[in-house]
Image (tube, grey):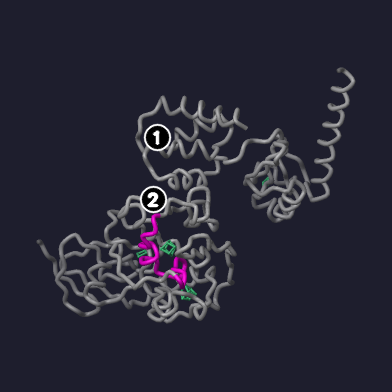
Amino acid sequence: MKTVSLTIDGRKIIAEEGTKLLWVALDNGIYIPNLCAIRSSPEPAAACRLCFVEVAGKEAPVTACTETVAEGMVVNTRGKKALRLARSAFELLMASHPVDCAGCPANRSCELQKISGHLKVKLKTKRLRTLLRELPIDDSHPLFTYDPNKCVLCGRCLWVCRQQLGIGVLGFAHRGFQRVVTTFADEPLGQSRCQECGDCIAVCPTGALSFKDSAKPAARAVKI
Amino acid sequence: MAEEAEKIRRETGRVLGRFSRKRGNLIPILQKVQHRLGYLPREAMLEIARFLDIPEIEVYGVVTFYNQFRRNPPGKHSIRVCLGTACHMKGGYITLDAWKRRLNIGQGETTADREFDLDTVACVGCCTMAPVTVVDDKPQANVEPTRVDGILLAFEREREKKHKENRESS
Ligand code: SF4
Ligand code: SF4
Ligand code: FES
Ligand code: FES
């Protein structure tokens, strides 16, 4: 294995050549907000715009999920410019999110709460006007509930469903503000080919996909 | 209905017969099938997914992403409400609501009797006439909700007239 050495937030780190900066940071216990990055995916989606960091010598902040580590690289995950971009992206995301943590199945394990704490931005943003999508909740499946309003379109669920398990029940459909994770013809999940593995729920970073209380299995980790 | 299903199967099959099973053929296949049927029915999308061996949601994702694809049969009359900048400013979205209410269908849908289909367009190049609705390819000026009623009334009159003529001639 060929390695490179770099510095992240003042810490010297040895990393495998060719790895993306985001994974190197996370593996070394340095948190960078991220939602859409999927380790096993060959192409980063780079859609959420939350993982901005600053790299010495580069004028503009870069997304850590697309930046390959390089010998001698000096990274600052706390740079002002980078955080400003990440904060704006987060506020935009939350401006159409129905924040109701107390009544949400993801409360306290939610990635959005973690990011909000890390970026020091409130979940309920004051700076932007709220525009909710008001989509119907899909309660048709016996084991789990899908609340598209809480979905952040990270794509993790469809990745496990399709790439890892080869099923492909879930996918993106529609466009713009109407974009959703859904099934063929927007059919209720209870009628789909879902095989009830529950992996999509395990990888969902928010309360969008959650087990029904009666069906809650022991928590398990699913790697993607 | 059975006739329709048979036609869908036949026409989709015909199109698929001319393509190889490559994922990259998805969009040209969809275009050809829509060209033959006027829209992309559910059964056609499922057939195409099977043919290309991809999850059906992937076909659905592409069909719902591009404006050129429709999932409902075209109506006898097409209603296209302009939501370009000028028409938007002049309340085009209120006009759209009026059409929806009167026809009792949503955007991208067709009435049950297949008389009308409703959709939006973005600027048809006659902004001075805003808010514009393009009715059967003809841009109509100042289509406020009251004009919506007027246009529908005219269609109804025409229908009645034809009906009468048919009765008289038979
Ligand atoms: S998804 Fe997260 S941020 Fe949203 S209501 Fe649930 S716990 Fe709160
Ligand atoms: S349902 Fe969850 S995992 Fe799937 S895209 Fe939405 S937020 Fe991501
Ligand atoms: S994790 Fe980098 S853009 Fe989403
Ligand atoms: S905006 Fe409607 S015609 Fe230009």
Q: Kindly identify the amino acid type of the residue bearing the numbered disc 2.
A: Gly
**Mark 1 neighbour class, 10 Å CA radius: few under 14, some 14 to 19, many 20 or more:** some
At 38% from the left and 80% from the top, the residue drawn is A118
Q: Return the chain for callout 2.
A: A
Magenta stretch encompasses residue A194 = no
Q: Chain of mark 1?
A: B
Whether residue B157 sits left or right of residue B25 in the image: it is right
B97 over A199 or under it: above or below: above
Image quadrant where residue A164 sits: bottom left
The magenta span reads: A195-214
Amino acid at circle 1: Phe
Relative vertical location of residue A11 with respect to residue B23 in this rendering, above or below: below
Image quadrant occupied by the N terminus of chain B: top right
Identify residue for label 1.
B51
Q: Residue at x 9, y 61 (%)?
A: A1
The picture places residue A180, in percent across and down from the top left corner, at: 50, 57
Q: Nearer the viewer, residue B108 or B56?
A: B56
Q: Whereabouts is ligand 2, in terms of quadrant?
A: bottom left
Height in image: B20 above or below A65? above
Q: Position of residue A171 (x, y in %)?
A: 43, 53
Q: Secondary structure under badge 1? A: helix
| Quadrant in the rendering for residue B170 | top right
Q: Secondary structure at mark 2?
A: loop
Looking at this view, name the residue that lies furthest to the front: A214
Residue A168 got which mark?
A: 2
Magenta segment includes A213:
yes
Depth order, front residue of A39/B72:
B72
- For the residue pair B102 and A197, the one nearer the viewer reads as A197
Q: Is residue B115 above or below residue A108?
A: above
